[in-house]
Image (tube, helix red, strand yellow):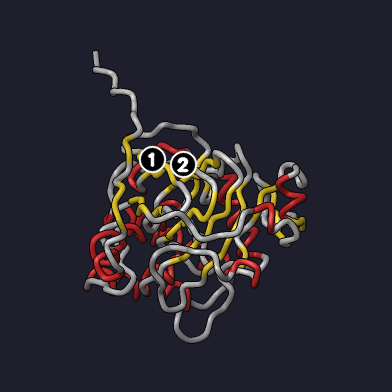
Amino acid sequence: MPIPEKAATIQETERVRFPGARRFLREYAAEARPAIFAGPPARTAALDRLGGLDLLLGRADPEGSDPEHLRATLRGYLAGAGAGFRCLWRPIPPELRGVAGPPVRFRGGERRFRVGRKGEVSALHFDAELRGVLLHQASGTARVRWVPPGRSPDVDPFLNVGRAAGPFPDESAGELGPGDTAFVPTGWWHRVEHFGDGLAVRVRLPRNALNRALGGRVHTTWRAAGIAASAPGPAALTAVDRADLARVRAVLAAPGAPGDRLAAMDALVRELHARRCGGPDLPPDPAEAEVWRALADSGVLYAPIRGRTG
């Protein structure tokens, strides 16, 4: 009789002072190493002084490819406006220009903000753009959970969202207070729970050429996220990476209908994931395949391209 697997336990994530930009890129971004960087209390105005700030809201559990949006003031949102909706990431407005953010800046790394309500919990997801992300807690407190890409079959993935609750093997977590910053490596599953109303600032890291291609206008599955996580560095590519990138670009530039490129890319991504990542696979999901096909047929994905993919 087989011995049952030990129940998964959530480990505490590494908590350190920010090591500086170069060391961060070398030891954390390039090594796909989640962490919380402890910082001084954020320099930000109280939320009650920003009540007129305009927010864009999206459904907390969107369905299909045509999400519904609402607008609300920060005051109204914290008072309960937009039930079933959550604040989306938006460019930093003038009212927040003085807000402290992640302890490092990157060329082209746009900073965005969002407001979280007390008790709000995001879906377990990976960022479909396949970038590493710094999540800075400017005010309020939150808890972040990370699940490595190698555990993707355990999370019951659909598009870039995990439907299982966990905890999962190799899952880790850590708490954020004002001034703290969480690092989410490329392709990693993560979830954020807000313990109180709070303001967050996000910076997306640069991507290398392979991850720009896989995180562009293609169907970004959990397998693509696994491939991206196997080459997380924002710049350097190995000879194997460059060869795989050439194959991805060839599919994207191939003649034919978008649906043909989708099918070819799906086969290629499955092959690359099996070789580069290994581990268990999942049977095809007809419902997910239908969503990807609809997006391709509508021109959202796999439209004809000219020039370099990215």
Given residues 310 and 287, the one toward you in this image is 310
Given residues 111 and 276, the one toward you in this image is 111
Amino acid found under the numbered disc labelled 2? Arg
Distance CA(mark 2)–CA(mark 1) = 7 Å
Please identify the quadrant where the N terminus is shown.
top left
Is residue 291 visible to us here?
Answer: yes
Given residues 13 and 297, the one toward you in this image is 13
Q: Label for residue 73?
A: none
User: Helix or strand or loop: what does disc 2 sit on?
Assistant: strand
According to the picture, the residue beneath numbered tag 1 turns out to be 173
**Circle 1 crowding by C-alpha within 10 Å: few under 14, some 14–19, many from 20:** many
Where residue 309 appears, as percent x and y from the top left, is: 46, 78
Q: Earlier in the sequence, mark 2 or mark 1?
A: 2
| In-image side of 99 versus 61 (left or right) | left
According to the picture, the residue beneath numbered tag 2 turns out to be 143
Is residue 271 visible to us here?
Answer: no
Amino acid found under the numbered disc labelled 1? Ala
State the residue at coordinates (33%, 24%). 7
Quarter-of-image position of residue 226: bottom left
Quarter-of-image position of residue 17: bottom left
Position of 222 relative to 250 (above/below) = above
Residues at circles 2 and 1 in contact by the CB criterion of under 8 Å: yes
Where residue 56 appears, as percent x and y from the top left, is: 71, 59
Where residue 160 appears, as percent x and y from the top left, is: 51, 51
Position of 196 relative to 303 (above/below) = above
| In-image side of 70 versus 150 (left or right) | right
